[in-house]
Amino acid sequence: MPSQVPKADIKTGLALYTVRDEMMKDPDGTLSAITRTGYNWVEAANYSNGLFYNQKPAVFRNKVDSLGLKLISSHCSFSSENIDIIVSDTVEAGISYLVLPSLPVSWRRTLTGIKRQQVSSIVQTFSSNRIHVKPILPSRA
């Protein structure tokens, strides 16, 4: 087994999406390898049905914490129907930043004033729970 690389003074992070297959097969072993490599922050990329990598939010957070990692962010899709559970699970997991990889399909077709209001309202819901929302917007070329 490789020896542990000393933690750097600078913060380094890894998007778990880059090791998504390994995380689904062996989350404990994968997180341990990430720690040994010297990373200290991670971003989750598999949130589904109230679970992060098939684990309840608090269980996943404790696992990450026990390895000396910080679960700083996650990316997941949401809609007005599932926002409450996502907020609850994000808070329970100790996540500070939520990346929205895309808006719901129905919102992308026409972003009228009402749709903008929906987005604004949902962002406010996250913000009031101290979750920072960072939408990824396409660049205009």
Image (tube, helix red, strand yellow):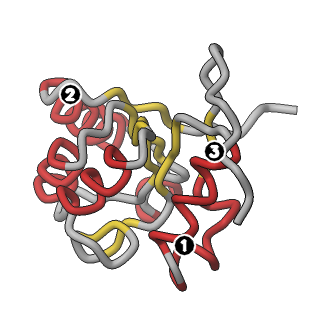
Total numbered badges shown on the rendered structure? 3
Q: Which residue position holds label 2?
A: 124
Neighbor class of circle 2 (other Cα within 10 Å; few <14, some 14-19, many 20+) is some
As helix, strand or loop, the secondary structure at mark 3 comes to strand
Q: Residue 62 in the image: state x and y as whole percent.
A: 25, 52
* Distance CA(mark 2)–CA(mark 3): 27 Å
* Distance CA(mark 2)–CA(mark 1): 31 Å
Residue 11 found in image quarter: top right
Of labels 2 and 1, the one closer to you:
1
Q: Which residue position holds label 3?
A: 14
Q: Residue 16 in the image: state x and y as whole percent.
A: 58, 57
Neighbor class of circle 1 (other Cα within 10 Å; few <14, some 14-19, many 20+) is many
Query: What amino acid does circle 2 point to?
Result: Gln
User: Which corner quadrant holds the C terminus?
Assistant: top right
Query: What amino acid does circle 1 point to?
Result: Met
Q: Residue at x 54, y 72 (%)?
A: 23
Q: Mark 2 vs mark 1: which is more N-terminal?
A: 1
Q: Are marks 1 and 3 in contact (CB under 8 Å)?
A: no
2 left or right of 59? right
Q: Residue at x 61, y 70 (%)?
A: 20
Q: Residue at x 22, y 59 (%)?
A: 57
Q: Residue 85 in the image: state x and y as whole percent.
A: 13, 59
User: Which corner quadrant holds the N terminus?
Assistant: bottom right
Query: What amino acid does circle 3 point to?
Result: Leu
Q: Are marks 2 and 1 in contact (CB under 8 Å)?
A: no
104 left or right of 43? left
**Mark drawn on residue 23:** 1
Q: Residue furthest top?
A: 9
Q: Mark 1 vs mark 3: which is more N-terminal?
A: 3
Q: Residue 13 in the image: state x and y as whole percent.
A: 61, 36
Q: Mark 2 vs mark 3: which is more N-terminal?
A: 3
